[in-house]
Image: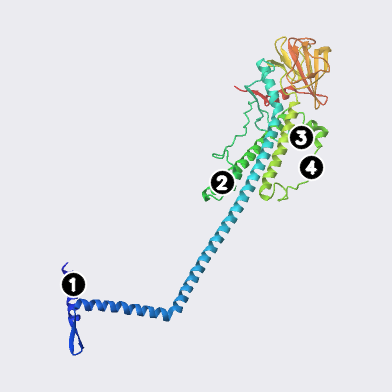
């Protein structure tokens, strides 16, 4: 406060020193007059003079340098306009680049989704083929389970078709085992979390959104692709194992090689094939390019395996593998034995199965009755031709329930256990023939244990 008063005093002192009271004298007609100018008036005149001179100076400078000022303003405007246009060009270039990337991204998404959809269709066809391959033996399993439960024609929910053979191999020789078959591992369903109901084509079309959405779509598409690849890998593993096990089951009968059985099953129709030639070595020929070639080749292999699996299952379905009796006691084996009537060594051409008099006898496979009647020491006998070179014979029956020429379904009742002919008690004499040569029935029944097995 004191400092401010000090400066005010100094300013007033300066004004009093510079603008002391002055007088202007005027002489007119011999008379002298004067005008007194106070310090305040002098200060006002000085201020007016300063403003006037400043305006004159400013106007003079504008008049003299007008063109230079206008030129400078024009240069500044041109510079600003150039910078603005350059910025707009940069923005337009960035927009074009972004739009191009979006178009490329959308096309990539659409191409990827088309590939996934095509793979899905192929996998759906493959799974349908796999389901149809299992249908015949599944129906036989249900029928077999119904006879075990004593309710023929009713589905057996507690039974399953099992194919797991310990020590299974590709060759005809199979390690003998009496262990119960383990349940075959089925395909596990796959679910990509959060992928249900996603419209991938729609998402690709709205890719102008946040980069996080694009990244999410990429992740989901990759997950689906991996899941599809995992599924085809799983199917290939299961079908490879199933084919090996089916071959092992056929080999257990010790009568025919699985490949020869496939030829018998397919007949001449098995060679009826065609279609355009597509070299698997051509990386651009299958499924649209190199990235898809591996999947297409794998799909082809699995499809071939499924066809082979279906043919093997059909072959097995035509083989007399099921036991003709539900419950029995083994009394005499196939091969050399001592005759029960004269005590001499003789060849026994079948398997003797003791059971209650009148017990039902079931057809171990579908076929046609070629003989039903009385035949010497066999007593009442039934012979059935199952095709593919297989025939079965049932002797010592008490009752025959079929006629010659009749078509027989799997597990259909054909007769009753008895003791007719050269027999010492109620039992079934069961024979299996292949290509006109009698075979060991126990091998077929043992192989059938790996096809029809009761759980629990």
Q: Which residue is mark 1?
A: 8
The one of 203 and 186 positioned closer to us in this rendering? 203
Query: Disc 2 versus disc 3: distance between alpha carbons?
Result: 48 Å
Q: Residues within 10 Å of mark 1 (few under 14, many from 20)?
A: few
Give residue 100's quadrant in the image. bottom right
Task: Please state the horizontal and vertical placement of residue 256, each as a whole percent of the image.
Answer: 77, 30
What residue sits right under mark 2 in the picture?
217
**Residue 300 in the image: above or below residue 321:** below
Q: Earlier in the sequence, mark 4 or mark 3?
A: 3
Mark nearer the N terminus (1 vs 4): 1
CB of mark 4 within 8 Å of CB of mark 2? no
Query: Where's the N terminus, which quadrant?
Result: bottom left
Look at 55% across and 51% down and name the residue there: 208
Disc number lying in front (2 or 3)? 2
Say whether disc 4 or disc 2 marks the residue closer to the N-terminus.
2
Inter-mark Cα distance, 2 to 1: 78 Å
Give above or below for 453 relative to 21.
Answer: above
Q: Secondary structure at mark 2?
A: helix
Residue placed farthest to the bottom in the image?
30
The residue pinned by badge 3 equals 259
């Amino acid at each position: 406060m004191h400092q401010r008063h000090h400066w005010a005093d100094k300013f007033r002192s300066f004004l009093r020193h510079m603008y002391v009271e002055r007088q202007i004298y005027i002489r007119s007609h011999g008379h002298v007059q004067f005008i007194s100018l106070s310090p305040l008036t002098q200060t006002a005149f000085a201020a007016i003079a300063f403003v006037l001179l400043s305006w004159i100076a400013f106007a003079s400078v504008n008049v003299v340098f007008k063109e230079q000022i206008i030129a400078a303003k024009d240069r500044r405007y041109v510079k600003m306009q150039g910078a603005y246009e350059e910025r707009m060009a940069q923005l337009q270039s960035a927009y074009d680049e972004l739009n191009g990337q979006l178009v490329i991204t959308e096309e990539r998404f659409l191409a990827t989704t088309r590939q996934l959809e095509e793979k899905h269709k192929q996998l759906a066809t493959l799974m349908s083929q796999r389901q149809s391959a299992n249908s015949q033996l599944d129906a036989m399993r249900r029928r077999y389970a119904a006879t075990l439960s004593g309710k023929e024609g009713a589905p057996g929910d507690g039974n399953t078709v099992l194919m797991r053979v310990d020590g299974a191999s590709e060759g005809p020789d199979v390690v003998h085992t009496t262990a119960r078959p383990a349940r075959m591992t089925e395909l596990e369903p796959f679910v990509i979390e959060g992928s249900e109901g996603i419209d991938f084509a729609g998402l690709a079309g709205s890719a102008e959104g946040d980069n996080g959405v694009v990244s999410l779509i990429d992740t989901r598409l990759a997950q689906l692709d991996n899941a599809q690849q995992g599924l085809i890998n799983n199917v290939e593993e299961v079908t490879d194992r199933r084919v090996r096990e089916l071959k092992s089951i056929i080999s257990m009968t010790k009568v025919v090689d699985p490949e020869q059985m496939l030829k018998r099953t397919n007949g001449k129709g098995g060679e009826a094939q065609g279609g355009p030639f597509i070299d698997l070595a051509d990386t651009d020929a299958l499924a649209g390019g190199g990235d898809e070639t591996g999947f297409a080749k794998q799909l082809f292999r699995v499809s071939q395996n499924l066809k082979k699996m279906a043919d093997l299952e059909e072959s097995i379905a035509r083989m007399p593998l099921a036991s003709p009796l539900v419950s029995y006691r083994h009394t005499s084996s196939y091969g050399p034995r001592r005759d029960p009537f004269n005590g001499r060594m003789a060849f026994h051409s079948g398997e003797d199965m003791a059971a209650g008099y009148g017990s039902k006898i079931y057809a171990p496979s579908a076929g046609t009755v070629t003989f039903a009647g009385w035949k010497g020491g066999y007593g009442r006998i039934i012979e059935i031709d199952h095709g593919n070179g297989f025939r079965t014979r049932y002797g010592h029956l008490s009752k025959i329930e079929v006629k010659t020429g009749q078509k027989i379904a799997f597990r259909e009742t054909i007769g009753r256990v008895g003791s007719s002919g050269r027999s010492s008690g109620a039992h079934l004499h069961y024979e299996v023939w292949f290509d006109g040569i009698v075979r060991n029935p126990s091998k077929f029944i043992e192989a059938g244990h790996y096809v029809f097995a009761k759980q629990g």
